[in-house]
Amino acid sequence: MQHGVHAVRDRTDAELIQQCLDGHSEAWDVLVHRYSRLIYSIPFKWGLQREDAKEIFQSVWLDCFQELHSLRDIDRLQAWLVRIAIRKCYRFSTSKRSRPEDVEIVETDHASEDPSEGLIERLDREQLIRMSIAKLTERCQQVIKALFFEDPFPGYATIAARLGLSSNSIGFTRDRCLERLGKLLEELGYEH
Amino acid sequence: MESRIGHIALVSLFERARLNTELDGSAQAHLNSCHLCRGRLDWMQVAAGLGVRELSYDPPQPVMEAVLRLGRDSSRLKQLRNAVVALLTFDSFKQPTPAGIRSTEASSRQMKFEIHGVEIGVLMRLSEDRKLSLAGQVLEKLSGPIQDPAARVDLVIEGDRIMTSSLSPWGEFVFPDVPKARYGLQVYFLDRMLQIPSLPSIDEQRSPG
């Protein structure tokens, strides 16, 4: 059973989309979880509020669901999702007159938007990090999340205690996990 | 601090990225000339930049559940599997212009799309303030209006849903005063979905008379 879940998780976006259309709801679950943080983070980066973020998140996924038939052949679902999310943020922000200071909007005749390349690049890199972390072992995921995402930084002794390691060996584990994450990022095409 | 093979130790890069500790002079000099170490520092800085906010980017559970429920909606999935593109069969702009009408004066455009025995009539109007109104009717050629109280039409731009209109009992829909743009329509009824990926623009030149 566990093996089956992993098999679905490792599928490409195109394979998952086809499985969704074939009625396999677990494929939809995997797709949504794969990009949920990415999509939910965009309204916040745009300077919108939590209530707006919730609405935009649901709206993006509703659009995605209703476009499944035409997304089967798409190369990069992630880019499509980001584009739709940014458009919705743009519409929210223009209606509420809020806009992040670091995002330059270029209006087009489509009443659409073209935020700075910087935002999209940053979103791409962040997503690669999320996807690489998801491929680590459970233990390495714990280490990496503690190292990078906890505030304040818990310290090596605390991380070691949580993992049941001696504080002497946490350094090896930390380095192995960082090394592994770096390799996974490289495999996924992370560029700086 | 540099490791035995000459690159900066991962822990030093991590602490530089996460804890803002300074690299010593030789490590800093190495960093300036080493692509590998700069690459490592770059991803660590992006990861550190995500920081504590990353854990707050988990959507609230009820929101997530609402989204996940979509994938269990078998009737909607059936509509998507049965999606077809409707074809343009009539366009008022392709009809000869009556004498005395200049091609640039058109403020409305009428079209008809058809597929599998269903007709979608669309009337596009441009107001004086350059807003667009779209109205139309969906009919089964043989039996008339669509018999489905849940039938609806979505107005979309490249997959991005802008607005939804329910179909009236006579199969009518309307999208009043939308910004001028290249829209598509998606009609959902029973177990079917008809798509007009991109409506012709109201700005196109009419055929000469």
Image (cartoon, rainbow, N blue to C red):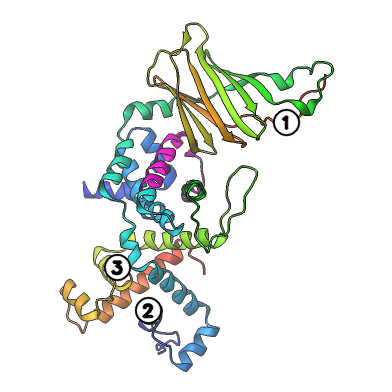
Instruction: Using the rendered view, name the quadrant where residue B99 is placed.
Output: top right
For this rendering, which residue is in front, A73 or A1? A73
Q: Please tell me whether mark 3 sits on a helix, a strand or a loop.
A: helix
Q: Label 2 sits on what residue type?
A: Phe
Count of marks, rendered view: 3
- Mark 3 and mark 2 in contact? Answer it, CB < 8 Å: no
Image spot of residue B51 (x, y percent):
35, 68
Q: Residue drawn at (58%, 46%), measured in percent from left and top? A: A112
**Which tag is nearer the camera, tag 1 or tag 3?**
1
Location of the C terminus of chain B (image quadrant)? top right
Residues behind callouts 3 and 2 on a single chain? no
CB under 8 Å between discs 1 and 3 = no
Crowd class of label 1 (few under 14; some 14 to 19; many from 20; radius 10 Å): few
Establish if A115 lies above or below B85: below
Q: Picture coordinates of residue B83 (x, y %)?
A: 47, 26
- The magenta segment: A54-81
x 31%, y 75%: residue: A176
Tell me, yes or no, if residue A135 can be seen here. no
Image vertical order of residue A26 relative to residue A114, above or below:
above
Q: Does the magenta stretch include residue A59?
A: yes
Q: Which chain carries label 3?
A: A
In the image, taking residue B117 as reference, residue A10 lies left or right, namely: left
Q: Between tags 2 and 1, which lies in front?
A: 1
Which is more toward the observer, A10 or B124?
A: B124
Q: What residue type is labelled 3?
A: Lys
**A51 falls in the magenta region:** no
Let me know if marks 1 and 3 both belong to one chain.
Answer: no
